[in-house]
Amino acid sequence: MTNNDEGMSLVEHLGELRKRIIWVLLVLIGGMVIGIIVAQPLILYLKNVPPASGIAWNAFSPWDSIKLYMNFALITGLIVTLPFALYQIWSFLKPGLRVEEQKASLIFIPLAFLLFLIGLAFAYFVVFKMAFIFTSEISERLDIKETYGITQYFTFMFNILLPIGLIFELPIIIMFLTKLRILNPKRLHKLRRYAYMILVIVAAMITPPDLISAVVVSLPMILLYEVSVWLSGSIYRKQLIKDQEWEEEFGPK
């Protein structure tokens, strides 16, 4: 930590936080502009691949097309902004971290972005398609003609993609909190049963109401939690070794 960082007042910290938030919002707006530009080819592509291919699309409101563009703009903006926002969070917390912690935590940014993309892919290619096929089969059994609104279809899709994409950030969040010494493996072991219960509930909420679908989605989430615990343990052991080396050299803290 530098002398300037040590001498910063609460007002100065708040001012710095405000500047970083403004920059994040500006990048979000820029990402949304990109989203509006790429919305049309993305929509046309998603309309012509399973499970959407062969569906007759409808607009139930004059605003549906505009809403669709704005939804894609927002999703694209969030994807573009995520790594920048994570970097801004890291930069704001950087003065309170040791040099080795600064370098190690910086690696979290590309990993978090990669995990978010993997979560989106898993949500689209597995969970969303599974949910859509399930609902279509129910409609077919009840002899109901499916008439889809374009906005309703993509809202249904985004409501599945975003939560799962965020859940895939769990290992990064736990690693980061372990680095900050807020969490440790012992606490995570104690919280395991509650974490499992929450993950199973989330899986049941975003999947069709059948056991197989819930299991297919909840198992990767539980695996993510266990990987997070293992990573937390690895970081925690290194922290204990460094603390011991510090005490041997300088005495107890």
Image (cartoon, rainbow, N blue to C red):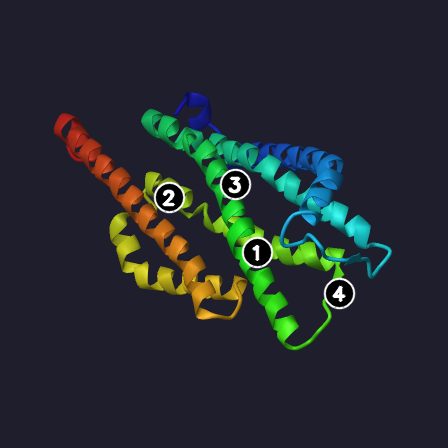
- Marking on residue 177: 2
According to the image, label 1 marks what residue? 129
Q: Residue at x 18, y 34 (%)?
A: 241
Camera-near label (3 vs 4) is 4
* Along the viewing direction, whichever of 97 and 47 lies nearer the viewer: 47
Q: Nearer the viewer, residue 61 or 109?
A: 61
Q: Position of residue 145 (x, y in %)?
A: 73, 70
Q: Earlier in the sequence, mark 2 or mark 4?
A: 4
Residue 207 x/y as whole percent: 52, 63
Q: Earlier in the sequence, mark 1 or mark 2?
A: 1
Helix, strand or loop at label 2? It is: helix
* Foreground disc of the pair 1, 2: 1
Query: As shown in the figure, which amino acid type bears the numbered disc 3?
Result: Leu
Relative to 117, is 32 on the left or the right?
right
- The residues tagged by marks 2 and 4 sit, at their Cα atoms, a distance apart of 46 Å
Which residue has dot 4 on it? 147
Count of marks, rendered view: 4
